[in-house]
Image (spheres, rainbow, N blue to C red):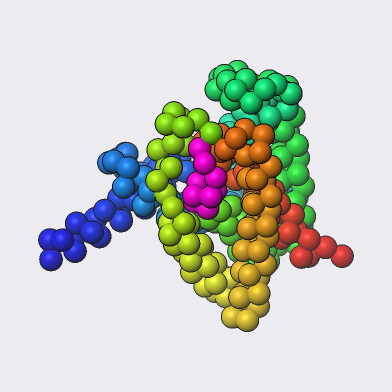
Amino acid sequence: MKSVGRFAGAWASAALAALQLLTRLPLPKRMPDGPDAFRRSTVFFPLAGLAIGAVLAVSGFLAGKAFPFYAAGAVVLAAWVMVTGGLHLDGLMDTADGIFSNQPRERMLEIMKDSRTGAMGVLAAVTVFLLKGAFLAALLEEPDRTRFALIALVPVWSRAFLPLAIAGWKHARGEAGMGALYRGSGYRHAAAAGVLAVLLALPLLAGIGGLGWAEALRATGAFAAATCAAGIVLAQAIARKLGGLTGDTYGAINEMLETALLAVAAGLFAG
């Protein structure tokens, strides 16, 4: 029984670690204890995404009661930044500064380590903000249960891809950087994260989203396919430039996937 308790406790700690890393929710502070804990925590990245998505959906519902849809979209975007602490947005800006510097690979990595943000980083952040805000406004113009469920699932699927990015591409900085702590996460962790994302998405779409199970399955498949296709293209393009991925690029991939998935969700209701 003690071994079962230790096993359950280890996975519970991993889930808490994922929530602590990827959100700014008020949780007990406990960093992962050793490389195994960091590896296990990647399995729960979609769960952290669902916590973020719940904040977004509730913010959208409440803001839609008080403001026009375009203002409600801006409120949700602000809530998005606050609940994540801008973690991935920072990675996007650093990655843009490095990749678009037109410098040799090693210099790109040095630029990404610089705490100062350059013009390309600002442009990348502004572009993502404008696109996210527009897609959110489109979804909130005629809000319903399905749209709120899709908004909640965007951060689930974007974070479900990150374990695959960690497993599938080498770390560009070797042993250095925050991202290197997760380098032991392998394809089995990525597969487990994908399964968890499906298990979270199906009941959310069929329950809160009000879809039938067949429709929920099709929507889940569409989100999963879009996530994998866009994520692989992004990861490969960045890795080709940098010789691998880093913690910053994981954040950049997440931000761009969120934007792409919001576009998919908004596109479902276009016309």
- Residue 69: image x %, image y %? 75, 51
- Residue 24: image x %, image y %? 45, 40
Specify the quadrant of the image occupied by residue 61.
bottom right
Which is the main secondary structure of the residues drawn in magenta?
helix
Residue 121 in the figure: left or right of residue 24: right
Residue 168 or 260: which is nearer the viewer?
Answer: 168
Specify the quadrant of the image occupied by residue 28.
top left
Can you say which quadrant of the picture contains the C terminus?
Answer: bottom right
Give the extent of the magenta segment.
163-171
The structure residue drawn at horizontal position 40% and vertical position 46%, both measured from the top left corner, is 184
Residue 255 or 42: which is nearer the viewer?
Answer: 42
Can you say which quadrant of the picture contains the N terminus?
Answer: bottom left
Rendered view: 171 above or below 60: above
The structure residue drawn at horizontal position 64% and vertical position 52%, both measured from the top left corner, is 232
The structure residue drawn at horizontal position 70% and vertical position 21%, both measured from the top left corner, is 103
Residue 247 in the figure: left or right of residue 266: left
**Residue 162 visible in rendering:** no
